[in-house]
Image (cartoon, rainbow, N blue to C red):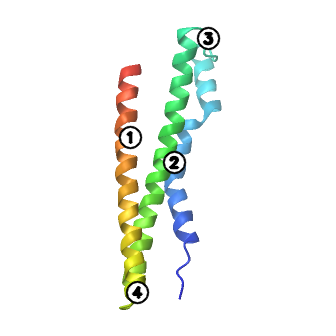
Amino acid sequence: MAFPIAPLIIAGLLVALPAQAQLDISRVESEAQANGLKVYCGSGSQWSRCVLEIILKVVNFLLILVASLALAGIVYGGLMYILSLGDESKASRGKQAILYSIVGLIIAGIAGLILLVVQTIIS
């Protein structure tokens, strides 16, 4: 019996959807106009700072997505391991899925720390 991975992927994406609020440009523009601020980035160093902030927000969203998928991979690997019912090849695939998901989660965590350092340097 093959376990469908689609529900796990959908659940992971649903966990990452709140991060989409960080990319809501129309909300930012309306708040800026309400406060009498300029909506565009400007030129020179202001423009490069604006571009960096946009890149950081996109990377942050992608990190949340990767972390959600890694957690879904851990759940999937755990289910594969539990449902192997003594079959060594299935148990081995489950262990590998868990291991690779944990490695992906660690890499995403390190990338998040790097992102935090860059955000601190920029602001």
Q: From mark 2 to mark 3, how far is it between C-alphas?
A: 29 Å
What residue is disc 4 on? Answer: 84
What residue is disc 2 on? Answer: 18
Secondary structure beneath disc 1?
helix
Q: Nearer the viewer, residue 121 or 88?
A: 88
Residue type at tag 3: Gly
Mark number, residue 42: 3
Q: From mark 1 to mark 4, how far is it between C-alphas?
A: 34 Å
Kindly report which numbered mark, 1 or 4, lies closer to the viewer in this rendering. Answer: 4
Could you tell me residue 19's position as x and y percent?
Answer: 51, 44
> Which residue is pictured at 38% across the width and 49% down the height?
107
Mark closest to the chain's N terminus, 3 or 4:
3
Q: Is residue 28 above or below residue 84?
A: above
Q: Is residue 102 above or below residue 62?
A: below
Secondary structure beneath disc 2?
helix
Kindly report which numbered mark, 3 or 1, lies closer to the viewer in this rendering. Answer: 1
Could you tell me residue 60's position as x and y percent?
Answer: 47, 39
